[in-house]
């Protein structure tokens, strides 16, 4: 049993908020596609004294003394990350996925250079050119989208836009796209226009690590990912690359540094100061877990669960963007259910089923009350939920969405949710009173 008595006695206000949050996590069905539950070893590593250290620089090249032992865990994180992604270089210091993308743009591009990425309403992330993010303010973004009829990427369209726009960097990888991505085809397009190819695999990194998705290397120049989604690590990110800079002659002819050095230099001192050594060590632990055969089985179950949830929802008449899923997430178009994304999110939340409202491609509604919801299976799979549970969850969701604002139904579903959560206990070794 993990003991929090010291915290409880020294700061009861923060302790109370932590207690309420862990109890919420234990008692709800977590369907947010970008969330997961870390293992106890990852959790323990995040709470260590490594947080006390300043380690600006990289292993064996630091600006501060006393880093011999910090170097050990960062070296381990780097070696394990390279293995997981078949990469030649890994920078494990980025504090978050948004910073990782910022750092890659900073490494390879000049301000106002052109980037081609996915339209945000079709699944792109804020850092893929939203006008409210640094990305849209500092770089000149142009976008491709999904095909209206199929909800799937049309690579001929991507090629057409790339040939017209001639971007310096093409981005593949999204926040709400339920299908696999063909990096090889993206590479061919990038080569036609002499662009760098960046894969942002924040969402499906776990599938790549488990070899259940086409590997981004050798097709991509650089890969960014968060470490806290399907990879099931601590909150943070990672930049992976090959050694070779295919476009050095065109874009960096006077640049003495190579691709790897440019990325490392953009992370520190370009965009960040001291790395979070406790988080980097926890990344090493999570990557170690992801290299084990059990992780492959976990990802296989994530995929089976997503398919089971998708099929049962479609049986209930829910429309899924692209009519299904290849990965861990589903994008549900609620327009035929006469319910908005916000209404569905609110009532599901009251019933203990947590998900997020989401724009759907060609959405006539606005981001704060869009037409869809996004669902994902990584967190529930970590708790041991299987296909039969997914079917039951789809039935419960259907009940809520078909009876919006019905407190009696919400109460009934809440009771069932509690039973399901009790059958799959989360962190049984942690009981905060
Ligand atoms: C595709 C993609 N890239 C980047 C990010 C940003 O990650 P973070 O929230 O760690 O900044 C996300 C987060 O959801 C994402 O989905």
Image: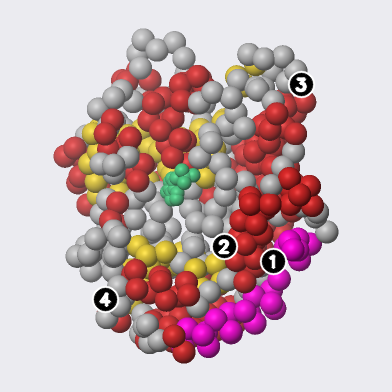
- Residue 202's disc is none
Identify whether 140 is placed above or below 60.
below
Could you give the CA–CA distance between mark 1 and mark 2, rounded to whole angstroms? Answer: 14 Å
Q: In the rendered view of the protein, which quadrant contains the C terminus?
A: bottom right
Which residue is painted at 45% across and 80% down in the image? 397
- Asked if the residues shown at circle 4 and circle 2 are in contact, with their CB atoms under 8 angstroms apart, the answer is no
Mark 1 Cα shell of 10 Å, populated few (<14), some (14-19), many (≥20): some
Could you give the CA–CA distance between mark 3 and mark 4, rounded to whole angstroms? Answer: 58 Å
In terms of secondary structure, where does tag 3 sit?
Answer: helix
Q: Is residue 417 magenta?
A: yes
Q: Is residue 199 visible?
A: yes
Pick the residue in front: 44 or 333.
Answer: 44
- Asked if the residues shown at circle 3 and circle 2 are in contact, with their CB atoms under 8 angstroms apart, the answer is no
Return the residue at label 2: 378
Return the residue at label 1: 426
Pick the residue in front: 110 or 188.
Answer: 110
Return the residue at label 4: 335
Q: Horizontal placement of 94 versus 290: left or right?
A: left
Q: Horizontal placement of 309 versus 380: left or right?
A: left
Question: Which dot, 3 or 1, sits closer to the camera?
Answer: 1
Q: Where is residue 375 shown, x and y percent of the image? A: 45, 67
- Asked if the residues shown at circle 1 and circle 2 are in contact, with their CB atoms under 8 angstroms apart, the answer is no
Question: Which dot, 1 or 2, sits closer to the camera?
Answer: 1
- Residue range in magenta is 409-433
């Amino acid at each position: 049993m993990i003991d929090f008595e010291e915290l409880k006695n020294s700061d009861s206000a923060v302790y109370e908020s932590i207690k309420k949050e862990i109890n919420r996590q234990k008692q709800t069905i977590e369907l947010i596609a970008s969330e997961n539950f870390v293992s106890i070893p990852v959790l323990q590593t995040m709470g260590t004294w490594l947080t006390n250290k300043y380690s600006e620089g990289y292993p064996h090249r630091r600006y501060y003394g006393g880093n011999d032992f910090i170097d050990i865990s960062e070296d381990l994180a780097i070696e394990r990350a390279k293995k997981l992604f078949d990469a030649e270089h890994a920078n494990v210091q980025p504090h978050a996925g948004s910073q990782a993308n910022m750092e890659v743009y900073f490494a390879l591009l000049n301000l106002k250079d052109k980037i081609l990425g996915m339209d945000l309403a079709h699944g792109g992330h804020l850092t893929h050119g939203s006008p409210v993010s640094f990305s849209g303010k500092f770089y000149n973004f142009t976008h491709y989208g999904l095909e209206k009829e199929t909800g799937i990427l049309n690579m001929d369209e991507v090629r057409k836009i790339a040939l017209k726009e001639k971007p310096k960097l093409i981005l593949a990888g999204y926040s709400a796209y339920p299908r696999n991505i063909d990096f090889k085809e993206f590479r061919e397009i990038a080569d036609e226009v002499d662009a760098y190819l960046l894969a942002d695999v924040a969402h499906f990194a776990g599938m790549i690590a488990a070899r259940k998705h086409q590997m981004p290397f050798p097709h991509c120049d650089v890969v960014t990912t968060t470490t806290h989604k399907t990879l099931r690590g601590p909150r943070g990110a990672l930049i992976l690359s090959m050694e070779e800079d295919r476009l050095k002659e065109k874009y960096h002819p006077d640049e003495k540094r190579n691709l790897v050095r440019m990325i490392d230099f953009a992370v520190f001192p370009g965009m960040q100061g001291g790395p979070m050594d406790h988080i980097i060590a926890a990344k090493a632990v999570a990557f170690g877990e992801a290299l084990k055969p059990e992780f492959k089985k976990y990802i296989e179950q994530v995929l089976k669960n997503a398919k089971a949830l998708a099929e049962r929802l479609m049986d209930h008449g829910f429309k899924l963007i692209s009519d299904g899923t290849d990965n861990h997430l589903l994008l549900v178009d609620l327009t035929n259910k006469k319910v908005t994304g916000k209404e569905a999110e609110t009532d599901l939340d009251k019933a203990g089923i947590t998900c997020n409202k989401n724009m759907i491609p060609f959405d006539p509604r606005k981001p704060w009350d869009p037409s869809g919801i996004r669902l994902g299976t990584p967190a529930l799979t970590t708790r041991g939920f299987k296909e039969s549970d997914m079917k039951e969850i789809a039935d419960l969701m259907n009940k809520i969405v078909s009876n919006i604002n019905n407190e009696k139904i919400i109460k009934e579903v809440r009771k069932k949710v509690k039973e399901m959560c009790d059958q799959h206990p989360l962190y049984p070794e942690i009981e905060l009173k």
